[in-house]
Image (spheres, grey):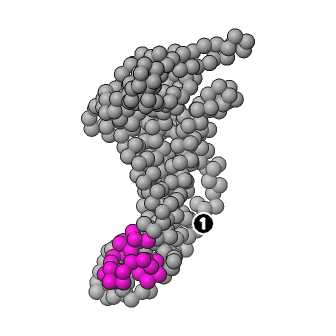
């Protein structure tokens, strides 16, 4: 692997490097994957503490800001001499005299400064403590800043998109973890023992793979009671998404176990009296752990898209829960598209997240492939 995948590493370093070091060296050569890695890490940092990156309270309604358009941040002000510093101008609402359409214009006579690490609304950090420190804060509460505009209830689309990242990105990780657990356990048992156990397991996997994924998701999601609390809805949607996601990984794990169980190191472990559980999880599984990790990174985008689709159709998470799919339901009608195209910003967040995770997974898969040049 060192001679093929890591062509620009000195032979003396490659000879003593671990498998993970070789994978990391190969991964760093994939520039697009490195960019995707940084984007992915940044998104999950936002998802951990969305309140810190939000500007306004995502659930606060403002009747005076219905379909408020996005505002720009300025750094130079020449209206009263020359001033430098981040600021914005409030928008003044006027009406077209002929069509009566709403027209928003910047009121350049009123400059509102923006502060970094300022104070705003109070939010909870992972349920551990509360704080009101925000990355971006405004000094005028009467004229809030709407980076991505506002929806029909005057709620800040940017802050709601940031808050929605916590649900949409975490549901992908939790769903993939459950699928991984089922796939490794059932696929490993099937491949290691073979025989009748393998036959039964494979028929179960064939049955799961034969199920039409989208109708099954829709049917199971529609069966959930509408009155359930948000946390219970979240857990059940995650289980539903994991229900059909484990079979493909289980089949891959089973094939690898079938090929590895005849290897010399497995036979040596058996002769040495090593318990079967230790042989599976300590000796056989780590030999293709890189492949499993790459499969996980490629499965997370599918989970995110599935949750977004279910919530968009009204069969997934329900308001007041905030996720990207729930937010996209605001852009389901022609009036919203024509009046407020910025309501599609959560969709742009989905596109960026899915592309970053796919590129990251592709780069990790190529780096873990010993035959990739």
Instruction: Answer with left or right where residue 98 lies relative to residue 303.
Output: right
Q: Nearer the viewer, residue 324 or 147?
A: 147
Quadrant for the N terminus, please. Answer: bottom left
Residue 192: percent from left, percent from top: 44, 77
Q: Residue at x 55, y 56 (%)?
A: 244
The residue to which callout 1 is attached is: 206
Instruction: Answer with left or right where residue 185 lies relative to residue 316.
Output: left
Q: Residue at x 37, y 43 (%)?
A: 48
Q: Is residue 273 above or below residue 106?
A: below
Tell me where residue 261 sits by quadrant. Answer: bottom left
Is 139 covered by the magenta stretch?
no
The magenta segment is 2-26
Q: Is residue 180 above or below residue 277?
A: above
Residue 87: percent from left, percent from top: 42, 27
Residue 258: percent from left, percent from top: 49, 80
Q: Nearer the viewer, residue 211 or 330?
A: 330
Q: Residue furthest left?
A: 129
Q: Is residue 303 visible?
A: no
Q: Is residue 13 visible?
A: yes
């Amino acid at each position: 692997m060192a001679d093929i995948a890591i062509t620009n590493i000195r032979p003396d370093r490659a000879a003593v490097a671990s498998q993970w070091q070789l994978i990391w060296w190969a991964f760093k050569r994939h520039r697009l994957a490195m960019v995707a890695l940084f984007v992915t890490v940044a998104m999950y940092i936002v998802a951990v503490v969305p309140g810190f990156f939000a500007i306004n309270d995502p659930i606060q309604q403002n009747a005076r800001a219905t379909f408020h358009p996005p505002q720009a941040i300025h750094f130079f002000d020449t209206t009263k001499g020359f001033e430098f510093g981040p600021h914005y101008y409030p928008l003044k609402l006027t009406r077209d005299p002929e069509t009566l359409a709403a027209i928003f214009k910047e009121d350049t006579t009123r400059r509102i400064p923006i502060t970094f690490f300022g104070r705003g609304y109070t939010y909870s950090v992972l349920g551990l403590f509360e704080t009101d420190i925000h990355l971006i804060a405004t000094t005028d509460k009467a004229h809030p800043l709407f980076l991505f505009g506002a929806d029909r209830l005057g709620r800040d689309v940017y802050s709601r998109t940031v808050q929605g990242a916590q649900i949409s990105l975490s549901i992908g990780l939790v769903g993939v973890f459950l699928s991984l657990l089922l796939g490794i356990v059932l696929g490993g048992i099937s491949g290691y023992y073979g025989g009748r156990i393998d036959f039964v397991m494979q028929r179960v996997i064939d049955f799961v793979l034969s199920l039409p994924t989208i109708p099954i998701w829709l049917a199971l999601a529609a069966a959930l009671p509408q009155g359930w609390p948000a946390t219970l809805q979240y857990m059940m949607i995650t289980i539903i998404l994991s229900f059909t996601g484990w079979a493909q990984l289980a089949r891959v794990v089973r094939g690898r176990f079938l090929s590895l169980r005849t290897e010399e190191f497995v036979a040596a472990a058996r002769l040495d009296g090593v318990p079967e559980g230790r042989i599976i999880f300590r000796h056989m599984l780590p030999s293709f752990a890189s492949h499993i990790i790459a499969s996980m990174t490629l499965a997370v985008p599918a989970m995110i898209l599935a949750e977004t689709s279910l919530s968009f159709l009204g069969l997934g998470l329900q308001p007041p829960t905030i996720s990207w799919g729930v937010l996209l339901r605001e852009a389901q009608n022609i009036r919203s598209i024509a009046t407020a195209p910025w309501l599609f910003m959560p969709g742009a967040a989905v596109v960026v997240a899915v592309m970053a995770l796919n590129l990251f997974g592709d780069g990790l898969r190529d780096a873990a492939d010993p035959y990739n040049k």
